[in-house]
Image: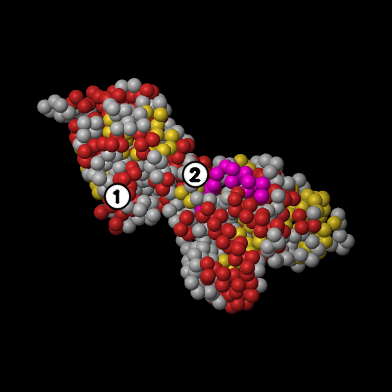
Amino acid sequence: MTNNQLTESGRLRHFLTIEGLKRPLLTEIMDRAEQFSSISHQQVKKVPLLRGKTIVNLFFENSTRTRTTFELAAKRLSADVMNLNISTSATSKGESLLDTLHNLESMHSDMFVVRHNQSGAAEFIAQHVAPHVSVINAGDGCHAHPTQAMLDMFTIRRHKHHFPDLRVAIVGDILHSRVARSQIQALAILGVGEIRVIGPKTLLPTDCQSLGVHVYHDMEEGLHDVDVVIMLRLQHERMQGALLPSAREYFKRYGLTEEKLRCAKPDAIVMHPGPINRGVEIASTVADGPQSVILEQVTHGIAIRMAVMSMTLGAQSEQEAQA
Amino acid sequence: MKLRITNGRVIDPASQLDAQLDIFIDDGKIIAMSDHLDNFIADQTIDASNHIVCPGLIDLSARLREPGQEHAATIDSETQAAVKGGITTLCVPPDTAPVIDTPAVIELIEDRAKKAGRTMVLTVGALTQHLEGEYLSEMLALKEAGCIAVSNGLTPIKNSLVQRRAMEYAATLDLTFFINASDPSLASQGCAHEGLVSTRLGLGGIPEEAETIAVTRDLLLIERTGVRAHFHNLSTSRAVDLIKEAREKGLNVTADVSAHHLHLSEHDIGNYDSLSHVLPPLRSTRDRELLQQAVREGVITAISSHHQPLDNDAKLGPFAETTPGISGLETLLALTLKLVDDDELSLQQAIASLTCHPADILGIEAGQLKVGAQADICIINTDAHHECRPEHFVSAGKNSPFSGWLFNNEVQTTLFSGNIVYQKG
């Protein structure tokens, strides 16, 4: 697989997927995020790293949390930010993805943060942008959501320290989850001892084991002795197409309740990329309970995105300097 | 016009011929195959030293995009591409626009093909009106207008009752029934083989059962109706097993495979390479190996281009949003002979799968070299090492995943009905 997200010297040129990245780079992202997270606690929450840069949030799919945290991250780095919700503008007028892109390029943007409902869209855009533009994948179809995975790793690191000793379970709709794919890759690169996925066969991809995970269909069994429980959001449309009979039946078997959580280690943390469906994949008592780190994840999202943005645009200036 | 092809290695799989011979052509027909012919004064002599001389190739499925999608390709552009690939007979599936469900469309295609004058273009009639899978088309009228077979193109007939009736009616008219086997519901969510790669890339999967379930249904209906049937473009090894079993049982069933499925697998999608987006999808490496084996063992008897020329925009986008299809006319021969270089097929087998075997499936005279036959001939330079460069294709469709592949074989000259319709410059 070609990895065109790295420069020749191994720096991040784009950030499209976790796949193919090396452990030191993931660690660097987290270390940098650690530095940035202190900024959020200062009176003046800004650093001038990306002053004069223009960042375009290009969202072909609705999002509140991800878009806002990207926007905040960019603003804290002093960049100019433009938000474009494409699903309601260009494409509805029949403009092609490439046309939209080239139009935005001619406005001299330096970075596109892209969310799209098709797997591979971020990769496609990265292949077609001008050489001076960086692309950050904010979620492409069922493929990847690398900044989400990194903020999850960051959250785990804050609580659990040593990755190789950990047992992590990801629960729910793995098949359609770009978050899960990126998390699994990141966990594997960071050397996590055991990665488990738990879900009904209808929501697990074919040859799931090839991702390097242990597969469980029984939640209690799968949660046994784990250090980290990651719950995935169950999209409402999964109730169609015969994937599941009902939300009620899903919650009964795969919803995270206090009782089921007791199968995990007593100090296990509970994570969720949000937005949560209370009573569908997670009980309110767990989501708001002492083991939940769900809101921390959101906070960490800003620092991680600051780290990734500064690193990609940094690599870009480096390249320009060399040229 | 009198032509003599000298010093070539003449290979004719239909008669098991493999010998150094001259071919003498007069008035579009082969009049002799021997060392010399008395009183024959050639208007033109073609020196085929160190070249293979074989029958012109027969392609069971090539979309020319005319009528209806002339922005993508035309009969003129694609027949030029065909003869550059050594193809002198090709079959056009019915999914043109309008579809080939009336004699008028057949006449239009045949007229344009005749005007182009380079290859035989045979039409495959639509099984159902507008290919909608509901009402039978007027197959008798289509047959009388010249269609060689009937099929429902790439839109399988969902309703098994309609499929059965269509087979019964085609059998009544002694028409061959072409099938692109795919279960529409199992295939509906996907754009890639359901397996390692779709799982990794998060692409919707098409399971092998989309093919095997459709093949199973159709084989049962073929057995009941007695129709002569041909399966296009098999992609899974388990479908091959089903065909093998049916043939052993004595069913009148044949099958072909595309040249690209014999060389590529799901892994060639790489990082969302839309040029490898094709239906049926590229399957596992094991499927690819067993498809090669099936050709070697004669379960699959024909190799076809399944040519689908597309304009560049059709391949520009996120993988699932791009149009599936590969431009295959100009790589059919080179890819097939590459299997000989790789010791997967004998030379006779390879050429047979492109000539006499597809002719048998169609029930036509073409595809062999013999005295009295129409002089459709392909002369191949087997020592023409070159790199595949789709941007230089004659076809209007440059959509080939084989860019950069190294081939040893190249067409030197193509004759259609005794006329030189292609000569490598």
- Observer-nearest of B369 and A296: A296
Which dot, 2 or 1, sits closer to the camera?
A: 1
Decide: is B255 above or below A114.
Answer: below
Left or right, B234 with respect to A82, comes to right
For the N terminus of chain B, the quadrant is: bottom right
- Observer-nearest of B373 and A247: A247
Q: Are marks 2 and 1 on the same chain?
A: no
Tell me which residue sits at (27%, 41%) in the image.
A282
What is the magenta range?
B277-294
The CA distance from mark 2 to mark 1 is: 30 Å
Tell me which residue sits at (39%, 27%) in the image.
A192
- The percent position of residue B401, horizontal first and vertical second, equals 53, 46
Left or right, B263 with respect to B417, comes to left
Instruction: Look at mark 2 in the image and give the residue it sits on.
Output: B195
Instruction: Look at mark 1 in the image and give the residue it sits on.
Output: A248
Tell me which residue sits at (63%, 46%) in the image.
B290
- The percent position of residue A195, horizontal first and vertical second, equals 40, 32
- The percent position of residue B313, horizontal first and vertical second, equals 42, 53
Residue B420 visible somewhere in the drawing: no
Type of the residue with mark 1: Arg
Location of residue A82 by image quarter: top left
Location of residue A265 by image quarter: top left
Hey, which residue is sitting farthest front in the picture? Answer: A259
Tell me which residue sits at (24%, 41%) in the image.
A283
Type of the residue with mark 2: Gly
Q: Which numbered marker is on residue A127?
A: none
Location of residue B358 by image quarter: bottom right
Identify the secondary structure beneath mark 1. Answer: helix
Callout 1: 10 Å neighbours few (<14), some, many (20+)?
some
- Observer-nearest of A142 and B321: A142
